[in-house]
Image: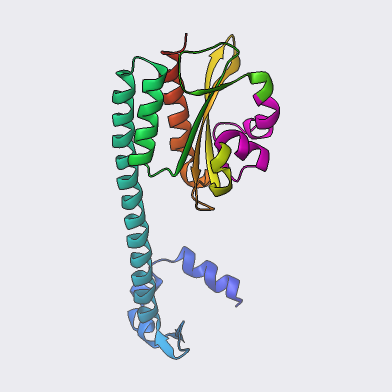
Amino acid sequence: MTEEEVVRYLKTTPDFFERHPALLEELTIPHPVHGGAISLLERQVSLLRQSTADYRGEFERLVDIARENEAIMKKSRRLILKCLSCESLDDFAAVVEEVMREDFAVDYLSMVLFTDDTLDTSIRTASWESSEPILKEMLLHSGCYCGVLSVAESEFLFAGQSRSVMSSAVLPLVSLENGQVVYHGVLALGSNRLNHFDKDKGALFLDYFSDLLSALLLRLLP
């Protein structure tokens, strides 16, 4: 009888060891660590303990993620409520900077609005025609951009602080008009840590903030 036949037989006869319980104590297999012989029952107990530890670790990880997400939602709620009370673009920029620095510990922050008009705001403005060639590669990505910026991108977004910015998240501020995405500006968040902004870790909430801030900004644009 081949090994495959033994495996097939045991799979199709699940009550085999129930009818032969003494065999479980007689069978021995190598210990996974020190190599000594242990019974099949001991090995099963060991596997069950390992599975339990793995499940417990995964459960604790999911609980930590849930707590982190809950904290982010509470902070985003504060951001929404404060932005809804803004009456000007300067109020909006001040609230965004306050919440991002205090609640999300952002090291560097820059907001740029794309317009050819003169706006009644201290927020930096630039024409789309001059901005698009610099930011084109970054904005080609779907949603928010996370990672390391090029020298030109970093200098455009963070100016004198660009040398200190090691990783960035750039949130497009957009609207959808006649089926086309229109860029009204960007919010750039910077960190002095290389891997602080990671697309795999925070993409969902970054895209959420991008949509949220875009909608709040549109209320205040002339």
- The residue lying toward the viewer, choosing from 168 and 110, is 110
Q: Main secondary structure of the magenta part?
A: helix
Which residue lies most toward the right here? Answer: 133
Q: Is residue 192 above or below residue 137?
A: below
Region of the chain picked out in magenta, as a range: 131-158
- The residue lying toward the viewer, choosing from 108 and 46, is 108
Q: Is residue 219 magenta?
A: no
Looking at the rendered image, the quarter that the N terminus falls into is bottom right
Q: Is residue 84 visible?
A: yes
Left or right relative to 124: residue 13: left
Query: Which residue: 55% across, 37% down?
Result: 158
User: Residue 164's x, y, as percent?
Assistant: 54, 48
Query: Which residue: 50% across, 46% down?
Result: 197
Q: Is residue 53 above or below residue 190?
A: below
User: Residue 18's x, y, as percent?
Assistant: 34, 72
Left or right relative to 185: residue 140: right
Quadrant hosting residue 217? top left
Q: Is residue 132 magenta?
A: yes
Query: Which residue: 39% across, 30% down?
Result: 96
- The residue lying toward the viewer, choosing from 48 and 206, is 206
Left or right relative to 162: residue 67: left
User: Residue 165's x, y, as percent?
Assistant: 54, 46
Q: Is residue 103 visible?
A: no
